[in-house]
Image: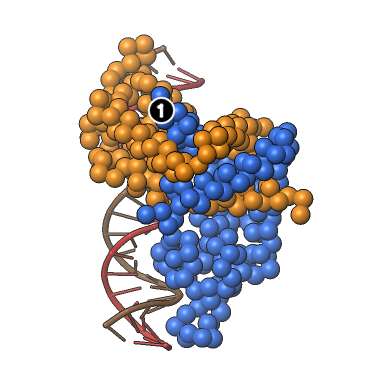
Chain colours: A orange, B blue, C red, D brown
Amino acid sequence: MTNTTGDDIAHTLGLLLRRSTRTRLHTRLTDGLEEAVDDLTYPVLSGLARTGPCSAADLGREVGLDRTTVSRRADRLERSGLLERHPDPDDSRATLLTLTDDGDAIVAVTRRRLADAIEDSLASWPQADARTFARLLRRFVDEGPFAADHD
Amino acid sequence: MTNTTGDDIAHTLGLLLRRSTRTRLHTRLTDGLEEAVDDLTYPVLSGLARTGPCSAADLGREVGLDRTTVSRRADRLERSGLLERHPDPDDSRATLLTLTDDGDAIVAVTRRRLADAIEDSLASWPQADARTFARLLRRFVDEGPFAADHD
DNA sequence: TATTGTTATACTCTATAACTATA
DNA sequence: TATAGTTATAGAGTATAACAATA
């Protein structure tokens, strides 16, 4: 019984990382928005919001996708007017992907929805618990067994 | 600045739920195991470990997959000897999916690896923090905006 | 020679429908 | 009639390789 805490967190994380959990979350966050925004295109959209104007190759490295995959997904977002392609003035080989105002708005809405949903569910918590949870979760994700740079 | 805690948790969860995080985790947990065990078949395997012998239709409802999908994935696990099919003595229409000893062993190994990885990353934490985190995470997942029965 | 974006091919997975058998 | 399991078809998405253009 030495690993009770690890077992407990492992079990909870298993629930959190389930496909059905992610599907439910995605449905909730994108309900009523552009049809082109789905679980495939959203990482491109939100990644681009983080990086700012960016080549497909660089964005692919940022979000862990192949540049061909980024290019195809960007097609859909471009057709829906959420993203534009412009020549990179600094490198004639590259095309900069840029969010349109509509694209920015979509990202802002989904981020707000997520933060609000979390805020709602924490409403019944003692404030100190909520802050403690935010801090420990952050530390766990940054340092934990899932961190990107974990050796 | 009223939603700082919600924003903070939202950001952290975004990192945790990324595809690259899940891919990294899956690779780590299944390294060196049966080739048939991948991100597609593992949910069937671990779901079956939770439910015990179970029909494809029931298991599908448990893990959020179509019965045709369960059937196909079970084919691969069966070919690798991790799962067996037996007639349901109580319902001649049904076939019970059952983990073999090898299948049980795979699930045990991956669960242990995950718990150990978490335990390792918590080693540098004050024990009280680790227990608090386990408790708050559990509560958040059970009650939070991602809970299955959340209305 | 390496990297850019894009496109074509082959492959995998899934959803829908269809089938047979049983409750 | 409804549900079980399985399989066939069609559709979507990806990875690999290839392409032309530029560094």
**Three-letter code for the amino acid on which mark 1 is drawn:** Thr
Q: Is B100 displayed left or right of A74 in the figure?
A: right
Tell me the quarter of the image containing the C terminus of chain A. top right
Q: Residue A76, image x and y in percent? A: 27, 37
Instruction: Please give left or right for residue C16 compared with residue A44 in the image.
Output: left
Residue placed under numbered mark 1 in the picture: B2
Asked whether B39 or A49 is in front, the reply is A49
Total count of labels = 1
Q: Residue A142: where, in percent of width, then height?
A: 59, 31
**Can you say which quadrant of the picture contains the N terminus of chain A?**
bottom right
Give the camera-side residue of B43 and D6. B43
Q: Is residue B36 above or below residue A140?
A: below
Q: Residue furthest right?
A: A2
- Is B110 left or right of A17, judged from the image as shown? right
Decide which of A24, B130 is in the foreground and name it.
Answer: B130
Residue A133's place in the image compared with B29, above or below, is above
Q: Residue B43: horizontal and vertical position, in percent?
A: 53, 58
| Residue situated in front as seen by the camera: B95 or A2 | A2
Confirm whether residue B35 shows in the render. Answer: yes
- Which residue is located at x 67 percent, y 40 percent? B130
Name the residue: 61% across, 69% down: B99
Above or below — where is A57 with respect to A124? above
Quarter of the image where one finds residue A138:
top right
Tell me the quarter of the picture where residue B150 sits: bottom left
Mark 1 chain:
B
Residue under the image location 37 percent in, 33 percent down: A111
Can the viewer see residue A56 in this picture? no
Residue at screen point 44% across, 83% down: B93
